[in-house]
Image (cartoon, rainbow, N blue to C red):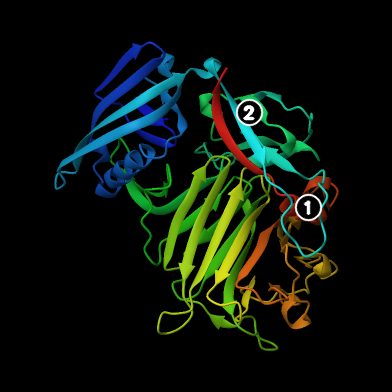
C-alpha cells in the first residue's frame, strides 16, 4: 500500500482526516472521515471510490480493514453505512464518512466454509459422489480442519493482491467424497484474505500518483451494486488461475479465456455464442449482438457470478441471457445460457477453427478437449456439459458444442487442462476427466466469519 492509506476490503484510499473508535457492551465501532482530492483529483477515480463505498455499505459482509498509520486497528469489519458529500464536482473533491462495526482482530475470528450442493442433473446417469468434490480456502490460510480430513493438492495462482505480476500464491485444493457432509474452518490474516480470491473488474478509471503521474487502472468491484455497463466496456472475471474477459466486441457475443501458467496468463482463446444451424465449413451460426448488459449477481472471494444479456434479431428480439460463475481455486468457469426459445440452437465454440482437430474421444461422455499436439505452454482447453452434446463432426471438429436435444437452457463449463512441464502430463486433479468430475459433482461454497 502507498504511504498513509487505509484499505477496506479491496478498496484503498488515502489516509482519513480522523478515525473515531467507540465501544459498548458486545460491540466496537469505527467512524472514519476524510476528504478525497488533491493527488487523487481525477474525477473518474473519485467516482469509482464513491460507488465502491456505497456498494460495500449495502453488501452485508465482513471484510478486512488495514491502516498503515496504526496497524493495531487492523482486523475484520462490516461496513454499516457510508455518506459522500460531492459539493465540489468541478474542483474534483469530496468528503466522505464511513461507519463500520469492528468484528475483531485476526486472532478473534475464524472462517467457515459452508459446503452444500449435489451432483448436477445430467444425461449420463452419474449419481454417485466422487473424490473430486472440492473447495479451496484463501492462500496462506492456516489451522484448517474438516471432519473428512480431505486430500490436499496444490495449484499455483497469480497473486492478485500484489502489484508484481510475477508474484504467486499456493492454493490447496481440498477433495473428498464426503466433503459436503460437514463444513471446514480455518484462519486467515487480513493481508491474505484476497489471495486466490475471485475478482470482478468492470471498466477503468484514471488515478494519479503522488508525483502527479496519471495511470489507467481496471475498476475492481467491491461488492455487486456498483456496476454500470456500457457497450464496449471490458469486464474481467478471474481467480488467479483462470481469466475470462467480456466486451472485446460490440457486434458479437464473445469471451476470451486464459489460464495462469507459472508466471503469466497464457493459452488465450477467443470464443463466441451463435444461434441456429452451423453450415458445413462455417465456424458459427447467426451472430448475436455484442453484450448489451452485464450485471453482477454475486461478488464474493469464494464465488463470483455475472450475467450477460444480448439479442439476436435486427428488431432487438431473440434474447440470450448467459450466467458465468467462477469459484476460488477452479480451473474452469461454469456457464448457463438461456435462449429465447427451445426451438433454436445455442452454439458455443472457438471463434476460429483450430489448426488441429479436437480430441473427440469423450464427446459421448460430455466433454471436448483441445487436440493440439503442441499447444502454447502445453495447456489444452476443455469444454463440456451435463447435457448430451451434439456429435456432428461439422461442429466438434471445429471446436463447437451445443445440446443434442432441444431446450432453451444450455449448461456447460469452459476451462483448461494444466500440464506439468516436467512430465508433459497433467497432474491427477488437473486432467480432463478430473475437471469434468469437479464440474458434475457440484459443491457450493459460502464462506462466513465466525467468532474464534
Residue 419, image x, y percentages: 78, 51
Q: In the visual, does 29 lie left or right of 406?
A: left
Residue 435, image x, y percentages: 76, 53
User: Residue, x 59% and y 27% (percent of image)?
Assistant: 111
Considering the numbered disc 1 on the image, is that residue within a helix, a strand or a loop? helix
User: Residue, x 56% and y 57% (percent of image)?
Assistant: 324
- 182 or 21, which lies in front? 182
Q: Which mark is residue 140?
A: 2
The vertical placement of 106 against 352, above or below, is above
From this viewpoint, is residue 208 visible?
no
Considering the numbered disc 2 on the image, is that residue within a helix, a strand or a loop? loop
Label 2 vs 1, first from the N-terminus: 2
The C terminus sits in image quarter: top right
The vertical placement of 258 against 35, above or below, is below
Q: Which residue is mark 1?
A: 437
Residue 420, image x, y percentages: 80, 48
Q: In the visual, does 89 lie left or right of 381?
A: left
Amino acid at each position: 500500500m502507498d504511504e498513509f492509506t487505509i484499505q477496506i476490503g479491496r478498496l484503498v484510499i488515502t489516509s482519513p482526516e480522523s478515525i473515531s473508535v467507540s465501544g459498548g457492551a458486545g460491540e466496537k465501532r469505527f467512524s472514519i472521515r476524510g476528504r478525497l482530492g488533491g493527488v487523487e483529483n481525477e474525477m473518474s477515480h473519485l467516482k469509482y471510490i464513491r460507488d465502491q463505498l456505497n456498494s460495500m455499505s449495502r453488501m452485508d459482509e465482513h471484510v478486512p480493514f488495514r491502516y498503515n498509520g496504526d496497524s493495531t486497528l487492523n482486523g475484520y469489519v462490516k461496513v454499516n453505512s457510508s455518506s459522500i458529500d460531492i459539493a465540489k464536482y468541478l474542483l474534483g473533491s469530496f468528503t466522505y464518512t464511513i461507519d463500520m462495526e469492528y468484528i475483531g482482530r485476526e486472532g478473534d475470528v475464524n472462517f467457515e466454509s459452508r459446503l452444500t450442493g449435489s451432483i448436477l442433473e445430467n444425461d449420463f446417469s452419474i449419481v454417485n459422489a466422487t473424490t473430486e468434490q472440492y473447495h479451496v480456502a484463501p492462500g496462506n490460510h492456516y489451522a484448517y480442519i474438516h471432519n473428512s480430513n480431505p486430500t490436499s493438492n496444490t495449484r499455483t495462482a497469480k497473486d492478485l493482491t500484489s502489484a508484481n505480476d510475477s508474484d504467486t500464491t499456493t492454493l490447496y485444493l481440498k477433495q473428498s467424497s464426503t466433503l459436503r457432509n460437514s463444513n471446514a474452518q480455518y484462519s486467515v490474516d487480513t493481508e491474505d484474505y484476497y489471495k486466490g480470491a475471485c475478482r470482478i473488474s468492470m471498466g477503468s478509471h484514471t488515478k494519479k500518483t503522488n508525483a502527479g503521474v496519471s495511470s489507467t487502472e481496471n475498476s475492481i468491484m467491491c461488492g455487486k451494486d456498483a456496476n454500470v455497463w456500457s457497450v464496449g466496456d471490458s469486464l474481467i472475471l478471474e481467480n488467479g488461475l483462470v481469466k475470462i474477459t467480456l466486451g472485446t466486441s460490440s457486434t458479437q457475443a464473445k469471451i476470451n479465456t486464459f489460464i495462469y501458467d507459472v508466471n503469466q496468463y497464457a493459452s488465450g482463446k477467443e470464443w463466441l455464442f451463435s444461434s441456429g444451424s452451423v453450415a458445413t465449413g462455417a465456424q458459427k451460426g447467426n451472430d448475436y449482438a455484442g453484450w448489451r448488459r452485464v450485471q453482477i449477481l454475486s461478488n464474493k472471494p469464494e464465488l463470483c457470478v455475472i450475467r450477460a444479456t444480448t439479442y439476436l434479431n435486427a428488431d432487438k428480439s431473440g434474447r440470450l441471457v448467459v450466467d458465468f460463475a467462477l469459484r476460488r481455486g477452479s480451473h474452469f468457469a461454469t456457464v448457463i445460457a438461456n435462449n429465447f426459445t427451445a426451438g433454436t440452437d445455442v452454439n458455443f465454440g472457438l471463434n476460429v477453427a483450430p489448426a488441429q482437430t479436437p480430441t473427440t474421444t469423450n464427446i459421448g461422455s460430455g466433454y471436448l478437449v483441445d487436440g493440439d499436439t503442441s499447444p502454447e505452454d502445453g495447456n489444452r482447453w476443455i469444454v463440456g456439459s451435463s447435457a448430451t452434446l451434439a456429435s456432428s463432426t461439422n461442429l466438434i471438429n471445429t471446436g463447437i458444442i451445443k445440446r443434442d436435444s432441444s431446450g432453451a437452457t444450455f449448461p456447460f463449463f469452459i476451462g483448461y487442462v494444466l500440464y506439468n512441464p516436467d512430465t508433459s502430463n497433467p497432474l491427477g486433479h488437473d486432467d480432463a476427466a478430473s475437471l469434468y468430475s469437479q464440474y458434475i459433482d457440484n459443491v457450493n461454497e459460502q464462506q462466513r466469519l465466525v467468532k474464534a
